[in-house]
Image (cartoon, grey):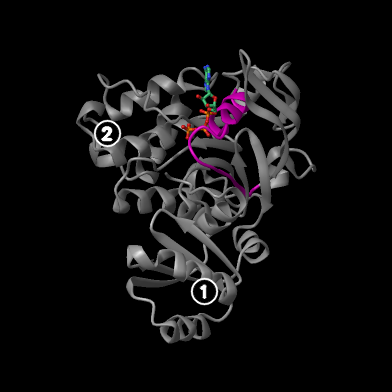
Amino acid sequence: MVHGRGANPPAARAGTLTPVSLKARGLRKAYGEFEAVKGIDFEVYRGECFGFLGPNGAGKTTTMKMIYGVVIPGGGELSVVGRDVRRDIREIKRRIGVVPQENNLDEELTVRENLLVYGRYFDLPRKLIRRRVEELLEFVQLSEKSGERVEHLSGGMKRRLLIARALVNAPELVVLDEPTTGLDPQARHLVWEKLRQLRNGGTTLILTTHYMDEAAQLCDRLVIMDNGNIIREGAPQRLIEENTSPEVLEFRPRPDRLEDLQRLLETEAEHVERSADLLLAYTHDSDALMQAVRRSGIEIENTLYRRASLEDVFLRLTGRRLIE
Ligand SMILES: Nc1ncnc2c1ncn2[C@@H]1O[C@H](COP(=O)(O)OP(=O)(O)OP(=O)(O)O)[C@@H](O)[C@H]1O
């Protein structure tokens, strides 16, 4: 594992017995009159991957920035690795890693130089930094690119380099703001694999995403955020079980039959959502529902069956989709 620290149990590694890595109470932030974060409570435990899932503008980035000390909270309490963000931000920065939403690598420098330069911000022996940089290059599969200038890397490689850079100080907690936005599926899967390895090695991860599959794949627990509020909290599967039905049939009826089909589904399904010309019917028994639709004779252009996801939870709670 990276830095050879994976064998230590999380609590022992951190030198404390408290299981809480981060705690927020009544946390808020306004920009002028506009309240971006409206008094939220959450806790992150050591060694877990904790997610913030929500659409653009929900307040996720603002929350992340309060955690890593770029934005000062407007109210409430926030402690990170047991330290108050208002009093001990230097200590917090020493102990956490940050992968920002925007790539802020030095494009003119090589891959290796980016890590070495960043490593110098921490008060660590040069020899140790050099060794760590080589380990990290290997971890994120960039050893072969180490002499290339960053401007020549693909988007996925840059993202992996940002992750490596966040690990230079061997942090116990890593904050990642939309770690895979803009990446193609293959590059995303590689980033996911690296994040899983980190978490399995005991590093606490906090990430934001508006991809429900990313949240479901990576997070042990997550909060769903909307309009500056946390609207639900829990393990991904549990959130689905508690907030929606397990099976979904998506119908695209002939446009002139949309109202008829909606009326039918409202009597036959457990609940129904409409998104433009698509009707989503939620049920425990998709076969029975499908038979009822066939019996009605309503012309359908397209039908899709799938299992319910976090996207459905969001739709149920807000009437909107995560990505509009
Ligand atoms: N510096 C700022 N000044 C004024 N308004 C801001 C500022 N930063 C963010 N906002 C506003 O606060 C709200 C929350 O933004 P934030 O970036 O935290 O959301 P988000 O959930 O991270 O969305 P995204 O996925 O787009 O990053 C948005 O309406 C945004 O326009």
Residue 105 found in image quarter: top left
Is 59 above or below relative to 85? below
Disc 1 marks which amino acid?
Leu
Q: Nearer the viewer, residue 207 or 309?
A: 309
Q: Which mark is residue 146?
A: 2
Of residues 48 and 178, which is closer to you in this image? Answer: 178
- State the image coordinates of residue 164 (x, y, percent, origin top left): 42, 36
| Residue under numbered circle 1 | 264
At label 1, counting other C-alpha atoms closer than 10 Å, the crowd grade (few under 14, some 14-19, many 20 or more) is: some
Of marks 2 and 1, which one's residue comes earlier in the chain?
Answer: 2
Near mark 2 (Cα within 10 A), the count class, few <14, some 14-19 or many ≥20, is: many
Secondary structure category for the residue under label 1 = helix
Numbered-mark total: 2
- Residue drawn at x 73%, y 16% is 87
Report whether residue 200 is seen: no
State the separation of the CA atoms marked 2 and 1.
61 Å
Q: Position of residue 45 (x, y in %)?
A: 70, 45
Judge from the rendering whether residue 319 lies leftward or rightward of residue 132; answer left or right: right
| Image coords of residue 197 (percent x, y) | 49, 52
Vertical order, 102 against 187 (above or below): above
- Farthest residue, direction right: 17
Q: Amino acid at mark 2?
A: Ser
Along the line of sight, the residue nearer the viewer: 247 or 175: 247
Residue 293, horizontal then vertical, whole percent: 45, 80
- Where does the magenta region start and end? 47-68
Reply above or below: 204 against 83. Answer: below
Residue located 66% across and 19% down the image: 89
| Residue mark closest to the camera, 2 vs 1 | 1
The reply to whether the magenta stretch includes residue 50 is yes
**Tag 2, which secondary structure?**
loop
Residue 233 - label: none
